[in-house]
Amino acid sequence: MFVFAVVIMPPIYDVFCEITGFNGTTGRVDTEQEYEVKEDRKVDVSFFAMTMGGFPVQFKPKISSMEVVPGKFYTTSYIAKNNTDQVVIGQAVPSVAPTDAALYFKKLECFCFNRQVFQPHEELEMTLRFVVEPELDERIQDISLSYNFFKLDK
């Protein structure tokens, strides 16, 4: 039971969250595929950044929001700066609100896909490339994308 709970369940839960958008988990696309672009529709996407206690890296979005057209790809970035004399390793975990929008917020490129290694006093600009799929419910006009960065030991 211990092996099942600790080793097998977390990857299954991650896949479940990615497929269903449960817990605000965003999806991923592998290529910049063609979507039907809805030029007459605009969605406001707001960007937020948080760090877990004990994570000595300043972390913030480069811009706080942008207006997007569903079906088009957009690029933005987040800035992170290690404020210590030590190498710091971290991982960012995304969340989308409202949770109904998570299924339609897809990332092509994201710093959250991999752990990040910050050299002492290093500042990094980390890229995010995303699309809001045109199938997003018409009632949703605003989406919030939040990242929580936490420290990894190794």
Image (spheres, rainbow, N blue to C red):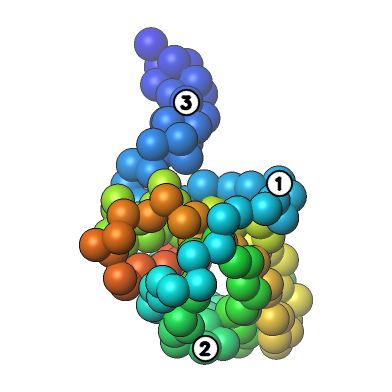
Mark 3 and mark 1 lie on one chain; the one further toward the N terminus is 3
Measure how far apart labels 1 and 2 are at the Cα level. 25 Å
Q: Are marks 3 and 1 in contact (CB under 8 Å)?
A: no
Residue type at mark 2 is: Ile
Residue 139 at x, y percent in the picture: 24, 62
The x and y percentages for residue 16 are 42, 31
Q: Amino acid at mark 3?
A: Ile
Q: Name which residue type carries label 1.
A: Asp
User: Could you give the CA–CA distance between mark 2 and mark 3, rounded to whole angstroms?
Assistant: 34 Å
Q: Position of residue 50 (x, y in %)?
A: 41, 74
Label 2: few (<14), some (14–19) or many (≥20) C-alpha neighbours in 10 Å = few
* Residue for badge 2: 63
Query: Of circles 2 and 3, which is in front?
Result: 2
Would residue 7 be found to the left or right of residue 50 on screen? right
| Residue at 38% over, 11% down | 1
Q: Secondary structure at mark 2?
A: loop
**Camera sees residue 60:** no
The image's mark for residue 30 is 1
Between label 3 and label 1, give the one nearer the viewer: 1
Quickly name the residue at label 3: 12
Q: Earlier in the sequence, mark 1 or mark 2?
A: 1
